[in-house]
Amino acid sequence: MATDALSDVLRTVRLAGAVYFDVAARAPWVAEQPTREMVLPKILPGAGHLISYHVVTEGSCFAGLIGAEPIAVEAGEVIVFTKGDRHVMSSSPGMRANLVTPDAFDEAAASPLPFSVNYGGGGGPPSVRLVCGFLACNAQPFNPLLDNLPAVIKAGNLQSSESNWLGEFIRLAISESTNKARRR
C-alpha cells in the first residue's frame, strides 16, 4: 500500500531535479546522509523537498533513520526516505559514520556524472552495490501529499511479476549499474 501512495505522489508532484550515485562498498562500510539543508543547495539547488533513495543492485546492507531500528535491504529492493531525513546505510546494523562535510558535496558536484563512490575495507569484490540518489521537487502546492507519506518506504522484489513503476525503476537501476561495471 505504501508503494502505491508513493507512486501516486510522484505522478502528481513535479520533479525539479534528480541525481544519483553509483556506489560499490566492501565490508565493513558505513555512510550517513547529512541534513537536507546541506544536500539541497549543493546537489539540487533551488528545490524545496528532498526524497532520498537507495536501490540495492547486488548484495545486501542495512538502512535506517538516525536513532531508528536498522532495516535489512536485499538485492532488488529499494529503500526510500520520503522526507530526505538524515539516515545511515551500512554493512552491519548499528554502525555510524563521521559527518559528511560540505566540501565532500562540492567534490561530488564537480565530478562527472554519474557520481561514483567507493566505501569500505580492503580489496576484493564489493559486498554490496547500490544506486543511491536524490529526487527533488517543489513542495508547494503538494505539501499535504508529501507530508502524509511515511518517512521510510521499503519495496521491491525482482521475483515479483509486478510491472509497476517501482519495479521498472529497480530493474533499470540494476541494468545501468551492471552496464557501467562492465565498461570499467
Image (tube, rainbow, N blue to C red):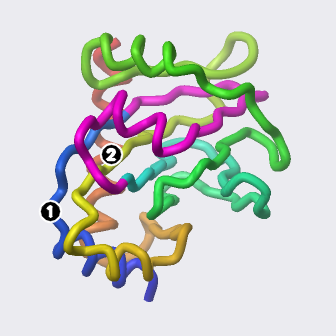
Seen in the picture, residue 66 relative to 152 is either above or below; the reply is: above
Q: Is residue 45 magenta?
A: yes
Rendered-image quadrant of the N terminus = bottom left
Kindly state the secondary structure of the residue where label 1 is placed.
loop
Residue on which the image places disc 1:
14
Residue on which the image places disc 2:
173
Q: Quadrant of residue 28?
A: top right
> How much space separates mark 2 and mark 1, taking CA atoms?
21 Å
Q: Is residue 142 left or right of residue 91?
A: left
In this rendering, does residue 77 appear at all?
no
Q: Residue at x 55, y 54 (%)?
A: 85
Between 120 and 33, the residue placed more toward the observer is 33
Q: Is residue 59 left or right of residue 62?
A: left
Q: Which residues are magenta?
A: 21-49
Q: Residue lying furthest right in this view?
A: 94
- Three-letter amino acid code of the residue under disc 2: Ala
Horizontal and vertical percent position of residue 43: 33, 31
Q: Quadrant of residue 67?
A: bottom right
Q: Is residue 89 left or right of residue 8?
A: right
Horizontal and vertical percent position of residue 73: 62, 57
Q: Residue at x 44, y 41 (%)?
A: 132
Q: Residue at x 24, y 69 (%)?
A: 10
- Three-letter amino acid code of the residue under disc 1: Arg
Horizontal and vertical percent position of residue 90: 71, 40
- Number of numbered discs visible in the structure rendering: 2
Q: Which mark is residue 150?
A: none
Q: Residue at x 68, y 25 (%)?
A: 26
Mark 2 vs mark 1, foreground winner is 1
Q: Badge 1: few (under 14), some or many (20 or more) residues near its Cα, within 10 Å?
A: some
